[in-house]
Amino acid sequence: MHVCSIQASSVELVKFDTQLMQNPDMLGVEYQQGTLAGYELREYLLEKWERTCAYCGAKKVPLQIEHILGRARGGTHRTSNLTLACEPCNIAKGTQLIGDFLKDQPDVLAHILAQAKASLKDATAVNAMRWALYERLQTLGVPVECGTGGRTKFNRVTRNLPKAHWLDAACVGASTPPALDIGAVTLLLIQAQGHGSRQMCRMDRYGFPRTGPKQSKVVKGFATGDIVKAVVTKGKKVGTYVGKVAVRATGSFNITTQAGTIQGISYKDCRLIQHCDGYMYQFKKGRSGIPPTAQPVGILPHIS
């Protein structure tokens, strides 16, 4: 709160209906009614199958809900009988048994059958922690609006916005305005990096030490994981580098930037930007001028 004045917060208070996932027809068609009908299940399938065609592995293409055992052969709408397929694969499979369709691809067949039966423990874990998150947000002392992943996707799709984490964040909850002005947005990207390995030294594949014991964590005022800016004015590495530093007792550091790792940078050329706290911070310009016809990659109506 002391860094950014927060007036209100919107959070996806996710709750997966695991009973409905196992038996979509248990309480009749009323479960499928309303503006958000089908969005929750579709979003779950996108996450479960990693937004990829189960048959050919195609990504970043429109996907369709596919019945592993076709409806024409008695297949149900249970989540364990649903996967994702691109349109060509969905048409090619048709009403064939999956074992016949993938008889020449036993590895793909085994993966699909195993993934289809995967437990819902992840969904259960999310259900268990959602109220803890809600209570933490309430301590901020500002209004907290709750939404679901399905509503977030509905808001993004109806506003014709592409799939992106920052746009999803802007589309959480019923308070999302009809139009979002995103042309001049500057993004703050925060990525968890951890605090490094706890091992005293690195091991080889046989379990024997392959490096010496760790040296001092602080060298010349810098610690591994600090964010630094290095300005090199002479030698073969002339340039400006911003990134995470790995210190060495010799004072010759490595700096990991977006472009890669630059080795052999003297501590004398480095200036501390931020002490290591386990996260990487970067600024990035948001997308502007998104054409009105841009369509996010998601799920099209299934045809199987």
Image (spheres, rainbow, N blue to C red):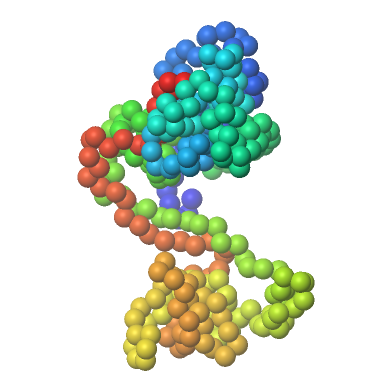
At a point 51% along the width and 83% down the height, the residue shown is: 253
Observer able to see residue 63: no
- Residue 76 image-quadrant placement: top right
At a point 52% along the width and 9% down the height, the residue shown is: 30
Query: What residue occupies the far right of the structure in this picture?
Result: 207
Residue 232 versus residue 40: which sits nearer the camera?
A: 40
Work out whether 225 lies above or below 164: below
Work out whether 7 lies above or below 34: below
Q: Where is residue 262 in the image (x, y as percent from the top left)?
A: 45, 78
Q: Where is residue 281 in the image (x, y as percent from the top left)?
A: 46, 61
Work out whether 156 lies above or below 253: above
Residue 253 versus residue 102: which sits nearer the camera?
A: 102
Residue 122 versus residue 92: which sits nearer the camera?
A: 92
Q: Position of residue 217 (x, y in %)?
A: 63, 79
Q: Position of residue 22 (x, y in %)?
A: 64, 21
- Residue 301 image-quadrant placement: top left
At a point 22% along the width and 40% down the height, the residue shown is: 291
Observer able to see residue 261: yes
Work out whether 278 lies above or below 299: below
At a point 37% along the width and 89% down the height, the residue shown is: 236
Instruction: Report whether 95 appears left or right of 63.
Output: right
- Residue 7 image-quadrant placement: top left
